[in-house]
Image: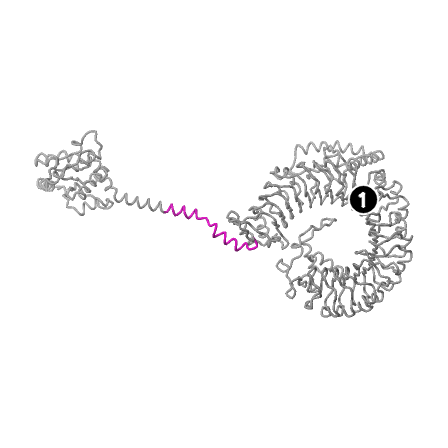
Amino acid sequence: MFTFVKLLLIYTVIHRTESIPTEIIQAMDDVLYEISDYQYFLSLPEQATYTMNNGQPHPCSWLPACICRNESEYTNGTYMTMVNCTQSGLSEVPETIPSTTTVLTLDGNSIQNIKPGAFKNLVYLKYLDLSDNFVDTLSEGLFEGLENLRTLELSGNNIRYNTSSLPDSVFKPLKKLVRLNLHQKLNSVDENEKYPAKALLELKHLEQLLIDGIETENIATTFSFMTNLTTLDLSSEYGRCSLKKITANMFKGLNNITDLKISNCSLNYIENGSFSGMESLTNLDLSYNEKLHFKSLANITYGLQGKNITELKLVKIHETYGDCTRIEADHLAYFKDVQVDNVYLDNNRLAYVSEDAVQYIPRSIHKLSVTNNMLLAGEYIHEMFKQAVFRNLKYLTMAEQTMKFDALKFFNNKTRHMLKSIASTSNYSVNLGQAVRKDKENFRYEKEHQTDAPSTMLDKDSLPFCGNCYLQGISYDIILYIPKDLKDLDFSGLQIRNELKNICICEHNSLERLNLERNVFWSWQGPIGGLSNLLSLNLAWNSCDNLSHDVFDQMTSLIQLNLTRNFIERFLREDTEGRIFKYLKNLRSLVLIDNKITSLPRKLFQGLTSLSVLDLSYNFLTQINVEFGHTSPLRFLDLSNNLLNNIGSNIIEKFDYDRKMKFYSPYCYLDLSNNNLSCVCKDIDFVAWVSRTNVNLRGLNDYTCTYKNGKLKRLALASELHQELLKDCADYTAVIVCSCLGIIVFLNVSLGGIIYRYRWDMRYFYYSIKLKMNGNKLSISQREEKKYKYGAFISYANENALFVKNALVPELEDTRQLPLLVHDRDFELGEYVYDNIMQAIKSSRKTLILMSKNFLKSEWCIFEMNMARLEGIKTGRNVVCLVMLEEVPLSGLPLEILDIIREQTYLELPTDIQHSDMFWDRVHGALIN
């Protein structure tokens, strides 16, 4: 896929004289991080670095195998349509390419024949890539119409350098061509092949020429007319270069060449002074010429004396197999007079540098790469320290060595020896002793008044040499010195087996990047001092299984930390308070790939307030719900290849919060590929979030989740799946509970109402049955013959007892011979009151109610009245006889009493005594009738 980064590089090459549009630079700022003086680019997935409209690549409507993009919005109209047909299975050039196309890539297809005029409508085309096809002939008129073309890539085809395959006028339409790549994948050079000088003569503005080196041709004569040529690449990417030697006159007159590359040829000899005449030469690459050997260094560097060389590449100029090699003094005899910035000596089986050769190493070197050699420890290292050979060194790559010694101990001894040398020639030891005494007091004070962050007790700018390693109250086991300007140190793949324990690097130093991956540093024990400027630390593939919580405490500037393929799971799992990463406030990228992590504490990453990239892929996480600070602009979270069913609410809330606070970026992505995602009822919130989120879920179209019946569902259809879950997983428990409670309440209310409505009926039946069961049943004959023991049961309130005793009993019972049942006098002792009342009502012809206000207040009176009322209802006889002793207000009376007062005739106690006999006669008559 044609990445956005690659597109930017194309723009730079084909538009060298123009400034890069600000829109592109602004877009790149969202993808690339620039850190202080040292820049490094995070490895982003294709989906994150190159997206089409709405974040998705758009296939061309005229040919779905290709991808199209409108570039005008990024380039102010300088570039319009980009058409990417890389590896699209094409056998010929499409005929329907849009006329507005400015970038066209057709590389990696099976195109062999291209018709003349195939591109004549593409008048705006600036970049054309036809590399890695099967083209064998460039016919005349092929490039008709391409007057604005600036870059033409024809490498990896089968074009011979002769007029039949490459006609003299074939490049004539290319008036503005700046770069031409003619490296072919043929495995030989025919006898009749020559540099296509006449064809190249048409390219007046050509600046970069990449062409296979031919032994029989005079390069200086062939290319002398190309006055604008600055880059000449005679290498062979496919092994077709036939150059065996370089002579002193080969490049004579090519004064404008700045970049010369002759790699992967058959060079075995370079004549002394071969590059002397190349006044503008700044970059020389002679790599992959295995017969040159270090003995050629003298002749190579002789012609470079007095020049300012930016880059000298001598990678693999020794055979792969053979004896170890060494650099001798005579190899570097002329090298000391060369001002060179970057030197590459990789893959040369280099094992040793003689002590005499050290003095000839240029002091101007900024970058040195000796990767994949066999370096041994020796006195030359001491000499390099002693002579400060690399005092200007900024980048050192020593990766892929096979060190058969304890490297840390060796360099530590050298540092101590150097410190003793310095101390013996200066007052350093005195100053250091004073500083130590002073700082021990500071250290005790700091311990007593310890703050939340590690302290730097003295200003590092005022420290003596290596003073930082002595002035912290810490006894360091190993003290290392590195050149003070060194920014980038690559010690990866050295197979060093050791502990990182109590190590201190002398300050002042400028180290910003440290790569220690693929060693065996099996234990990381803090503190590690002297790395206060470090921005990037790579400890991947060290098989570490012992990690202390303070190992990163003094690396407060760290921005990128890679801990891939270690065994620190237990230490991370037990760090419930986030102590390990507590002080890494500036960390942006944390990589924890393949650490066998099964779970993570919620607060582990809380101290990482600047974290934007977190890679936890290839672990054994079954659940994750870590917390991130609100200030951390989380952009990339890789959880692929774990055992996750879903992600926790904290992560969802973090992404939603960033979007709400406009921290959200179109390049933000979450990778959940190759997990055991599920979409059962408990995952409904996760599915709902997937359906609504704007976060780029990398590879979403391939996500599947397990439904409740074991069926796999596509998570790309999360909206439909969410609706399905809402139906299938609807929780009716609350509805059922509420319904049941409603029914119970309704039944209780209804039953309560019924009970209340028929409360007296039920009490009547209860006591009636009880009375019958006790053997007090009256015979039918008694009822029919109306033979009752008492003529009347008197129901009255206790407050009216005197009236009953002094008036009612004498008048009815004594005077008129009517037997009365008065509860104060006639109720059986030892019986329940309720039973006595029921027996009284049953054994009396009538129940005489003496109604008064006090009567209404008495529960017993109300009970007697209701039992008498129900006796009359159930037996059909007239039982109740009512006498009003006083005026009773009707408002508020129970319905039962109102029914008796309203439905039955009652007698009122007369106020006039003269009418008392008549009153009692009427009462007597009511009771016996």
Q: Could you tell me residue 167's position as x and y percent?
A: 81, 68
Residue located at (52% from left, 53% from top): 722
Residue 633 visible, this orientation: no
Q: Which residue is mark 1?
A: 373
Return the residue nearer the eye: 544 or 134: 134
| Residues shaded magenta | 715-742
Residue 379 visible, this orientation: yes
Please identify the quarter of the rendering in which residue 163 is found.
bottom right
Does residue 885 sit above or below 695 in this rendering? above
Q: Is residue 616 left or right of residue 308?
A: left
Return the residue nearer the eye: 592 or 485: 592
Q: Is residue 632 left or right of residue 146?
A: left
Q: In the picture, which quadrant includes the C terminus?
A: top left
Residue located at (67% from left, 33% from top): 447
Q: At numbered mark 1, what does the secondary structure look like: helix, strand or loop?
A: loop
Q: Could you tell me residue 416's position as x and y percent?
A: 80, 34
